[in-house]
Amino acid sequence: MIPEPAIDRLAAMFRTPDLTGTRYEIISTLGRGGMGVVYLARDTALDREVALKIFDRPPGDANEARIIARLEHPGIVPVHDFGELPDGRLFYAMKRVRGDRLDRWMSVARDLSDRLAVFLRVCETVAFAHAHGVVHRDLKPENVMVGEFGEVLVLDWGVAAADPSTSSGQASSTGSGQGVSAIVGTPQYMAPEQARGDAAIDQRADVFALGAMLAGIARGVAPVAAIARKAQSADAALRYQSVPALAADVNRYLAGRAVEAHREPLFDRAARVVRRNRLAILLVLTYLIVRVMLIFLFRV
Amino acid sequence: MRSDSAEVRRSAFDAMVAAYWKPVFKYVRLKWRASPDDAADLTQGFFMRAFEKDFFASFDPARARFRTYLRTCLDGFVANARQADARLKRGGGVTLVPLDFDEAERELSRQAGNAIADYDAYFHREWLRGLFAAAAARLRDDCAARGRRDRYPLFEAYDLAGDDRPRPTYAELARRHGLTTIDVTNELAAARREFRRFVVEALRQQCASDEEFENELRGLTG
């Protein structure tokens, strides 16, 4: 019979990875992501803190590290190192990001324009990944970090996969044996085709998730809510067909122009035109008033 | 256990019995205060009824852990058996994998001093004990088959040690086995790697779906 202390010891062995032979020491647990646990660790060789992701399974999950390593972008946390633990599990070390998760960042009162600016940064990063043939498949506020200096990072590419609709889609499917047809993601942010486990999940699944995130940002602002609704259309063909198209509509809103997704009432449209051209209208009005006054004075 | 093939179903059922019979026996002995013979009969009867009636086919991993579901079925089964005052007979035409109830009873007597406050936690721990014991036995056999003479004894002495005597240091183990401390470190690291692999494989075998396996693995790795 396995004695009581041994059960505790062996269970702890599963919870706390054995880092013998690596240059890392675990400091604490940061959280759980897709496919593994992320620890705060010290890189003893360079004497700096890193985020260390350790996968749940023995070999096969090199996918995430390879995807991230290939995607060099300011919105994606760079990978420093990759290796195998003595127990056979794979790990990778990445830059430690200090800041707030987007859901927590948004829980503090923020201007809509600030929230949309962060959203657009997320869109830029995701669009970059799409351009390299990678679909994230698990976009949600918990997977976005807003750093101390305003940097916006998209995390947790653990369930990312190749986009079958792009010729550059070269990312391998996740090493867990989950191809693009496996049901992965978070229900609230998951496109219907993803929830059904359809064979071909393309970038429009990420457009859906971004729409769900935008819906949380819109908070009753009709044009933004309309953009979010369009992005979340159940039929992928009715959504924005790419993330840049979605971002362009958000940018149109921020620039005070009409958005594609929203048919405005006449009064709202007039008010928006007035708001957008306030200075020009003021100048014209001033000119007209002065002109009328001059005509009146000459006649008198 | 949902396979169309009777052979696959039977094999999955046997694996499930092997993983759970001891926790079931001990649970019935302690929670239901059954005598050793009654507990053995109830354990046999429960698994036979489960096989005949396909109890576990309706298990939904999205709603509960398999262990919780099994324990709920077990409680219902024992309550009904008690109510009907029906002493279950062993056998009944279905042969289960051999179950060594005497060994389980000896284990129970060794655990006699431990008070049980939470039967759910107790059942989970007994399942974990069985899972680790099966993986350790596989490691022992694997080491013997591959001529790794020191690996399992080192693992047993260091990682499976109880609290009846002080745990040896790597240096003591090195002296005992005529190895260097680095050899002990390497052998233990390899043993743990293989042990982990055997646990994960056993877990995979116990789970009916990828989703259930993911949940169990996450439960184990915290």
Image: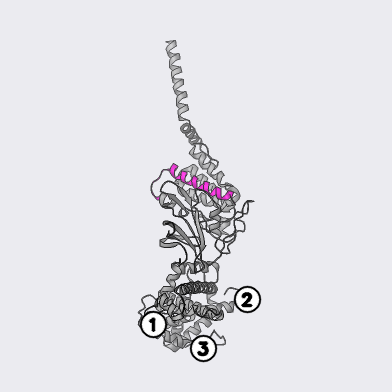
Q: Residues within 10 Å of mark 1 (few under 14, many from 20)?
A: few
Q: Earlier in the sequence, mark 3 or mark 1?
A: 3
Please state the horizontal and vertical placement of residue B221, each as a whole percent of the image. Answer: 46, 67
Please state the horizontal and vertical placement of residue B84, each as a whole percent of the image. Answer: 46, 85
Question: Depth check: B165 or A188 in front?
Answer: B165
Say if A96 sits above or below B79 in the image.
above
- In magenta, the rendered stretch is A106-132
Q: Is mark 2 on a helix, strand or loop?
A: loop
Q: Tell me the chain of label 3.
A: B
Query: Marks 2 and 3: CB-CB under 8 Å?
Result: no
Q: Which residue in the structure is indicated by mark 2?
A: B5
Which one is closest to the eye, mark 1 or mark 2? 1
Q: Distance between the residues labelled 1 and 2?
A: 40 Å
Say if A154 sits above or below A11 in the image.
above
Please state the horizontal and vertical placement of residue A86, each as a whole percent of the image. Answer: 49, 68
Question: Residue B90: which numbered mark, if any?
Answer: 3
The answer to which image quadrant residue B166 occupies is bottom left
Q: Distance between the residues labelled 2 and 3?
A: 26 Å
Say if B56 sits above or below B99 in the image.
above
Question: Residue B111: which numbered mark, if any?
Answer: 1
For the stretch drawn in magenta, the main secondary structure is helix
Q: Earlier in the sequence, mark 2 or mark 3?
A: 2
Which one is closest to the eye, mark 3 or mark 1? 1
**Quick check: do tags 2 and 3 share a chain?**
yes
Q: What element carries label 1?
A: loop
> What's the residue type where badge 1 is placed?
Gln
Determine the residue positioned at 52% across, 37% down. A258
